[in-house]
Image: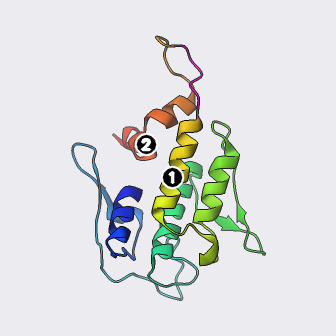
Amino acid sequence: TAEALDFAHKNNIIHGNVRPANILFTREDKIKVTDFGLPPHYRMNEKNWYAPPEREVSRQADIFALGVIMHQLLFGKNPEYDREGKLFLGNLEWVNPDAINTILAKTLALRTAERYRSIGELLQEWEDFRSSLSPKHTPGTPAHDKTELLKSESLWQRILKKIK
C-alpha cells in the first residue's frame, strides 16, 4: 500500500481518500489501492479517522491516513491525542516500541510540517526498523518469536491469514 502511494506521489498523483475500504486484495494476495483521484469524503461535521486535521487533499494527508491504518493494524484501535496534540501510543511488547512509536508519531503528527515529507521517507524508516530485528531462534527450529514474523511477513499478509 505504501509502495503504491509512494509511486503515485512520485508521479504527482495524490490519492485523497486513503482508507481500508480502498485497499483490496487479489486472489493471489496482492494488494491493490483503488479510488485514486475520487473526491475525498471530508465532511466537517463528521468524524473521519482517515482525514487529516487540516482537511486538505495533499501528500501529507495521504501519509496521515496511512498512519491511521498502521495504528489500527498495530493497536486495534484509532489513534488518540492528548490536549496538547501528542499522540497516545500503546505498548507493543513484541517489537522495539521506540522505533514503532517514532514512525507512528511522525506519520500521525497533527501538524503537516512534523509529518514525513514523503512516503518514501516513511518506507525507508520502516525498512530500517525491519532490518534491525534480529532472529531469536537458531536455524532449523521453528520461529515462534513475533519479531521474526514481523520481519518475514508484511502486516497485511498477517491480517490476511487471520481473516482466511
| Amino acid marked by disc 2 | Ser
x 48%, y 16%: residue: 142
Q: Please, what is the dominant secondary structure of the magenta stretch?
A: loop
Q: Position of residue 122 (x, y in %)?
A: 52, 58
Q: Secondary structure at mark 1?
A: helix
User: How many angstroms separate mark 1 from mark 2 (CA)?
Assistant: 15 Å
Q: Residue at x 59, y 51 (%)?
A: 75
Residue 103: image tag:
none
Of the numbered discs 1 and 2, the one sitting upstream in the chain is 1
Q: Quadrant of residue 32?
A: bottom left
> On the image, numbered disc 1 is attached to which residue?
124
Nearest to viewer (mark 1 / mark 2): 1
Q: Is 54 rendered above or below residue 31?
A: below
Estimate the x, y position of residue 12 in percent, counting from the top left: 34, 76
Q: Is residue 108 magenta?
A: no
Left or right relative to 26: residue 46: right
Q: Mark 2 = which residue?
A: 154
Q: Tell me the magenta residue range.
A: 133-138
Q: Is residue 86 visible in the rendered structure shown here?
A: yes
Indicate whether residue 137 is drawn in magenta.
Answer: yes
Left or right, 1 with respect to 84, comes to left
Q: Residue at x 64, y 77 (%)?
A: 111
Q: Residue furthest bottom?
A: 44
Which residue is nearer to you in this view: 109 or 113?
113
Q: Position of residue 107 (x, y in %)?
A: 57, 64
